[in-house]
């Protein structure tokens, strides 16, 4: 059996015993997904740096993972904390303008808003501009839902949140986006 073969459970058990090759196989298996997940905090380069940090933290803490069959969720929780820590550090440095990776077309489908008569603007660009103004938690969940294509249940599992919290936060984000996009287009929305 090669270093990269085996279930997550087998590789985690070997990594817990100090097998760097087994952990390297987990990095190969999850590296691209973790990097995409972390791209919500900035460009590809920043995401790669954050992914490396997440894997270093995972390696040093692998012995604390009790349920070896839950490695993916545990790893994504570590990556989420790394992203949140990086976001806090960036705010402390007053570095604004972080990009959020969200599939604009998928988001516009979810938050439909017809452009005003005669308008030819890019609704995807407007949606992304408004996503950047949302609270960090809402941006984070939108990026997982519309950037990574994860289901609400997968997001809840990965972040260790109740499913209801994820769906409620996403609903609130969609409502804010609808309201803000309507205001951008001069359309009266509910409660306006």
Image (tube, rainbow, N blue to C red):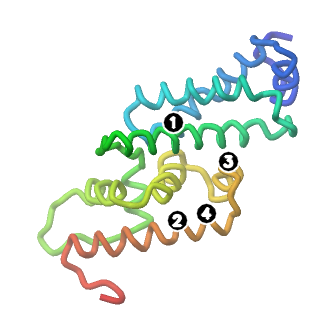
Total numbered labels placed on residues in the image: 4
Front position in the image: 159 or 179 = 159
Q: Earlier in the sequence, mark 4 or mark 1?
A: 1
* Residue at image mark 1: 36
Instruction: Give the alpha-carbon distance from disc 4 to disc 3, as whole Å.
Output: 11 Å
Q: Secondary structure at mark 3?
A: helix
Q: CA distance from mark 2 to mark 4?
A: 6 Å
Quick one: label 2 or label 3, which is nearer the N terminus?
A: 3
Please state which of the two labelled residues, at mark 4 or mark 1, is closer to the viewer.
4
Sequence order check, earlier mark of 1 and 2: 1
| Callout 2 secondary element | helix
Q: Which residue is mark 2?
A: 170
Answer with the quarter of the image where residue 17 lies. Answer: top right
Question: Gap between marks 1 and 2, in whole Å?
Answer: 19 Å
Above or below, 14 against 66 in this view is: above
Image quarter in which the N terminus is found: top right
Residue 8, position in %: x, y? 81, 29
Asked if the residues shown at circle 2 and circle 4 are in contact, with their CB atoms under 8 angstroms apart, the answer is yes
At label 1, counting other C-alpha atoms closer than 10 Å, the crowd grade (few under 14, some 14-19, many 20 or more) is: some
Q: Is residue 159 left or right of residue 187?
A: right
**Residue at the outermost front position:** 92
Mark 4 Cα shell of 10 Å, populated few (<14), some (14-19), many (≥20): many
Q: Which residue is mark 3?
A: 158
Q: For residue 11, what is the image quadrant?
A: top right
Residue nearer the viewer, 83 or 178: 83
Q: Secondary structure at mark 1?
A: helix
Q: Position of residue 166 (x, y in %)?
A: 61, 63
Q: Nearer the viewer, mark 1 or mark 3?
A: 3
Q: Tell me, for residue 166, which label it has, or none.
A: 4
């Amino acid at each position: 059996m090669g270093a990269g073969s085996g279930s997550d459970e087998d590789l985690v058990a070997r990594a817990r015993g100090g097998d760097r090759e087994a952990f390297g196989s987990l990095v190969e298996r999850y590296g691209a997904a973790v990097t995409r997940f972390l791209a919500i905090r900035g460009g590809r380069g920043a995401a790669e740096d954050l992914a490396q940090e997440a894997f270093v933290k995972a390696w040093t803490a692998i012995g604390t993972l009790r349920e070896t069959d839950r490695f993916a969720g545990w790893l994504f929780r570590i990556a989420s904390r790394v992203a949140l820590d990086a976001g806090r550090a960036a705010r402390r440095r007053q570095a604004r303008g972080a990009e959020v990776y969200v599939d604009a077309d998928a988001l516009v489908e979810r938050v439909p808003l017809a452009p005003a008569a005669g308008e030819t603007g890019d609704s995807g660009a407007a949606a992304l501009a408004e996503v950047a103004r949302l609270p960090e938690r809402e941006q984070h969940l939108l990026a997982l839902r519309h950037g990574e294509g994860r289901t609400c249940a997968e997001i809840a599992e990965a972040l260790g949140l109740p499913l209801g919290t994820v769906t409620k936060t996403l609903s609130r984000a969609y409502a804010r986006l609808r309201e803000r996009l309507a205001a951008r287009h001069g359309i009266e929305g509910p409660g306006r």
